[in-house]
Image: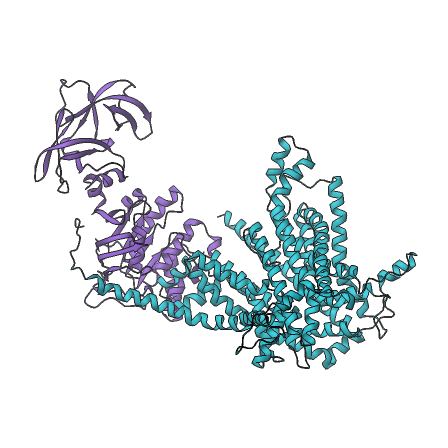
Amino acid sequence: MTLSTARRTRGADATTAPGLSGERRGEVVVSDIGLDYNGVPALADTDLHVHAGEFFTLLGPSGSGKTTLLRIIAGLLDPARGTLHIDGTDVTRTPTQKRDIGFVFQNYALFPHLTVAENIEYGLKVRKMPGAKRAARVAEMVDLVALGGFGDRYPAQLSGGQQQRVALGRALAQNPRVLLLDEPLGALDRGLREELGAEVRRIQQESNTTAVYVTHDQEEAFILSDRMGVMRDGRICQLGTPEQLYREPKDLFVAKFLGKTNLFPGSLVSSDGSTATVRVGDHDLVARANPAIMGDDVVCSVRPEQLVLGAAGAATPVPAGLTRLAGAVITEVRFLGQRRSIHLDASGIACSVDLDPAAPAPAVGDHVSLLVRPGEVALVAAEPEPKA
Amino acid sequence: MTATTDAPTPTTPLAINAAPVIRRRIGTIAGRIALLAPVVAIYLVFFVWPVVSVLLRSLSPDGKFDAAAPVIDFSNYQKIFIDDFLLRIEWRTVLLAINSTLLTVLLGFPTAYFISRLSKRTAGLLLLLILVPFWVSIVVRLFAVTSILSPNGIVNQLSLALGFGETSLLYTQAGTLVGTVMYLLPYMVLVLYAGMTSVDDNLVLAARTLGASSVRTFFTVYLPMVRGSLVSGALLVFILGLSFFLVPAILGGPQEQTISVYIQQQIDVYQWGIASAMGILLLIATIICYVGVVKVAGSFQPGGIGPSQAKGVSTSLPFRWSPWMAVSAVVSFITIAFLVIPVLFVFPLAVGETGTVVFPPRGFTLRWFGEVFTSQAWLGPIWQSIIVATGTAALSVGMALILARVTSRMTSTTWKAVIGGLAFAPIVTPAILLAIGMFDVQLKLGLTGSVIGLILAHTIIAAPLSYALIVAAMSSADRGIEAAAWTLGASRARAFWTIVVRGIMPSVIGAFAIAFVTSWDEVVLALFIQTGPTKTLPVTIYKYLESGIVPTVPAVASLLVLVVVAIVVVRSVTSRATSRRTAQLSARQEKP
């Protein structure tokens, strides 16, 4: 990853672990960390390796244990078992104060009785940075988070977005090895969220820290992350780049959680390394193989933008490069600006297709065929349904 | 960017990792205990021991508990329910409490209603007229009432002039009733006002749109909604009236003894047994009533510490004159006059030239003020009061901070409730019971007459109020900011002082102030355990009231009133200024 700006001068705290260059600060290794609340595991024994300088996102629904994991990394919660290393040093028993981290809280947790500048200054004062240097660093941070001229304001006099930036500046002022962010954009409205998300990413890159970001908003995760992990019920289901997770979900939960998808149950016919053959209804399909699948019951996940509508009837020819998946009846047609959303009923399975709005629209009641490119079908193991 | 890499790391056996976590937990528990130990010690020695000591004394016929040969004997209690003289005292006490509660409700309800219907500005002004007498020491107000009711006071003069003949209320049941109602009224009005302003106006409007007449709306919609505060206010007032000592002691005279006065007299002649039994009887009655308050109101809010700020009517239900409103206005006028006149009355008395207190005053002189500031008779008590009140406030805030810190960290709600209940127990306990118990214990410890002893005694009743303020502020403050300070590298102690305490500074100052005022005004405990020659200010005034009024008393009284007025005015001005400033700032913030 190349940096667009020159390396920033470090603060007074040159607590970089020996043997590591400044470039690679903030590697977080979580090994077998677990925690129980009243006997119920809030976090199953979890492994995670966040690379130095990476922007890593933990994505999951509420109660999936993502904040628990983040707080354990921060030292705000004690794990019941397992170890945690930052830059190769075991910090499992190190109190929060000594971990050299920055934490951005969901509600920002700004000190209400201190001004913006004093909030940013707090961590530097704790570290006994000399006055002149401290003032320079505070000015630098105020600029970095684009709050020039607001240094004398109190948190209550700032808008939500501005408060969020103060929280970010405060967490970064002492140049922490790892920046931990707990749904920092959750309280903001949509437009602001996108704008600030990009800014969080920019600031993280410029300040050259590792970031671990917790959110339940997948769009945020897609915009920000180098890599991400999807969490559910206290464990990480899948790790990878946003694209990997979207295109190759490992299980049904990840497939359904990320974006919209159409699910067609089927059974595995054969599998060889990279591709697999599946039977869905009367049709045989070629799909990407998924080593996580154990049994024969599978579900094909096809995104709405990957489906193509073709003429009805099993006998009609299929355009080159496409395979027929199922026959369906159109139940609803909606124009949504950037796309036209078509809802269909494929013999009991409700599914949806996104079409180019400029293309001619089908009518409700039309019989069509659902077509798909063979490589775009993702396979996941079928799950016993009651959950999710 | 590399693909998914779950770093395989060797697993560690569970036991090795589990141990340090447990050690850390034990560490924090030990820290908590070390912090709490002094608080618990003070609580046990100066609250639990006094009450237990009185209880044990009440169970022995001669009022002396002997640990070597403990006896349990109920003859004192038997006497309470058989002896004609004692039964008359008890009946008189209950009657006084009932009558004063009824009168208080009759005056307080229309007043609170009227004020709650006024515009914010007028309501604030009227509340101030109720708050100033409330904060003026009861001894000062009693002094004024004594002069008003005395044979050459204004009531008798007026009655003679109008041809009604001699009307002397001093040392009568009526006089006691007037004094008690004067003391209790502000509590009632403030409790009711808080309840009435929280009623949603839309409910009343809704009843009207459904066709209910205004009388029907009042009884079927409005009254049920304020019933909770009405009942809990009445119970609170009843409890206070039941064990009230000062008014019956000063205005009641020898024929109108109540339980509290009787207890004090028995202690004076060393009849501990019967006095203790009476004290325990009061305690039991009080506990029963408080259980009633908690049942009705859901929780117990110690009277007078909530912020009683004018809220003003909403535009949805504007103020409108009606016969009911007119009656309410008249009652409000009576209530406010009743509360304010005694407070104002001290000023003319203070500048009269005669050596005795007479009304109307003759001549004009500031001589008495000069005398107050030059004679040791007043400078001593003033200095003593300041030292004791400052010490009490400092100790109370310290204890409150520790206790609030520990309870705010607790996760168990039952433990929180238990600690909260225990913390408030001292202010619920009848003052006279606490006073004789404290006297007993401090005699044994050799603390009577010492400043430290009085500070500790006052801390017992002042700390709960400080605690209430601080724990409310701490629990409404964002807990996250402390964790945020930790993540920035601040040690736990540093985070606590620079972030948590600093963040709730207004409440800490308020806690200091309320403890200071509690000690400054306290009479009953100070009366018993101050055996030295120099007494605190209110006790000195009380002593003069008992023995006959010295001309400097009005001067001192008027100075005390002026101090309260000054503080109340300054506070309301500054709080208005702050709210205006924040409004301006937020307005400026709207415009980018």
* Picture residue at 30% right of the left edge, 27% below the top: A340
- Where, by quadrant of the figure, is residue A95 drawn? bottom left
User: Height in image: B178 above or below B454?
Assistant: above
Q: Is residue B176 above or below residue A251?
A: below
Spot occupied by residue A267 in the image (x, y as percentages of width and height):
14, 32
Q: Position of residue A136 (x, y in %)?
A: 38, 65
Q: Is residue A325 left or right of residue B254?
A: left
- Residue B284: where, in percent of width, then height? 60, 61
Which quarter shows the C terminus of chain A? Answer: top left
Q: Is residue A364 left or right of residue A317?
A: right
Residue closest to the far left: A272
Front residue of B23/B571: it is B23
Question: Where is residue A368, by image quadrant?
Answer: top left
Res. B391 in view = no
Does residue B295 sit above or below A219 in this rendering? below
Picture colour for chain A = purple
The one nearer the camera, B319 or B208, is B208
Coloration of the structure image: by chain
Does residue A339 appear in this view? Answer: yes
How many numbered marks are there? 0
**Residue A178, image quadrant:** bottom left
Q: Colour of chain B?
A: cyan
A183 relative position to A32: left or right:
right
Residue A303 or residue B107, whichever sits in front: B107
Q: Nearer the viewer, residue B572 or B241?
A: B241
Q: Position of residue A180 (x, y in %)?
A: 31, 56
